[in-house]
Each structure stands twice: as structure tokens, then as C-alpha cells.
Amino acid sequence: QVQLLESGGGLVQAGGSLRLSCAASGRAFSTYVMMAWFRQAPGKEREFVASITWRGGWGQYADSVKGRFTISRDNAKNTMYLQMNSLRPEDTAVYYCTVKPSVAASFESWGQGTQVIVSS
């Protein structure tokens, strides 16, 4: 079972940038078909932000972050990133990373999350 550890969150002004990291231990990202970022704002359900395939590095994004966020991975470091630019107050949330072991499976092994706060 993989353990995921997010980092890089913090307080930033609107229009600023942050880079989140998700480090995996116990099992390599290469054993998963897809990795992803989700977020949960206060009083709201957890929502999809972005995903990336291990093979090929093909990324998908929620419409709300498309053009502002970029997901990437470093297979050698067993780490995934989320570069967040042009941040908005509505991006404020706890950000979680997760993995999917196969196409048909659900996301599993959630990290503890990292808090992002965007002030206006």
C-alpha cells in the first residue's frame, strides 16, 4: 500500500502561485495507471482538480483550473506536482493527492492534504 504525503500549501494573494508536491512511499507511482489531485473547500464536497497518467504523462483538468494549473510527475523521485498560477479566492481548499491502480478501479490511498488559502 502506498503512502502519500502532500506539501507546498500556504497562504497566497489572489493572482499568486504555489506548487504542491505529492511524495509517494511504500510503492512506486509506476505501479499505478493514474495519479490525481482533488480538493475540498469548507462546506463543499471533494472535487476533482487534475489527473495524470503514469504512462505518457497525459493530463486532464477540471474546467475551473484549466489554463491556470499544470500537473506533472517525476518518476525518478516518485513525486507528483501541481503548479498553480493565477490563483483565485475560490481555489481555497485542502488539496489531496491520490492514485488509481487500474482503469476500472476507484482512486485510493488518499494523503492527509495540504491547505491552500487564497486571499482577495
Image: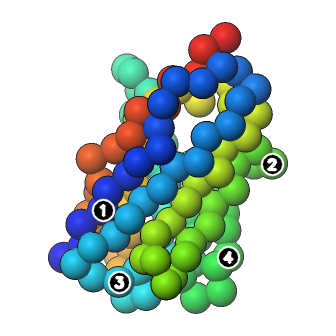
Residue sitting at 55 percent across and 76 percent down? 74
The reply to whether dot 2 and dot 3 touch (C-beta < 8 Å) is no
**Residue 102 appears at what percent x and percent y?**
39, 83
Query: Quick one: 75 or 94, which is closer to the camera?
Result: 75
Query: Quick one: 47 or 111, which is closer to the camera?
Result: 111
**Residue 43 appears at what percent x and percent y?**
37, 20
Mark 2 or 1, nearer chain start: 1
Residue type, label 2: Gly
Would you call the spot at circle 4 few (<14 residues within 10 Å), some (14-19), or many (20 or more)? few
Residue sitting at 27 percent across and 73 percent down? 25
Mark 2 and mark 1: span between their CA atoms?
A: 26 Å
The residue that label 3 is drawn on is 28
Mark 1 and mark 4: span between their CA atoms?
A: 21 Å
Residue 40 seen: no
The reply to whether dot 1 and dot 3 touch (C-beta < 8 Å) is no
Which residue extends farthest left?
1
Mark 3 or 4, nearer chain start: 3
**Residue 105 appears at what percent x and percent y?**
35, 76
Q: Which mark is residue 58?
A: 4
Residue type, label 4: Trp
The residue that label 1 is drawn on is 4
Q: Which mark is residue 61?
A: none
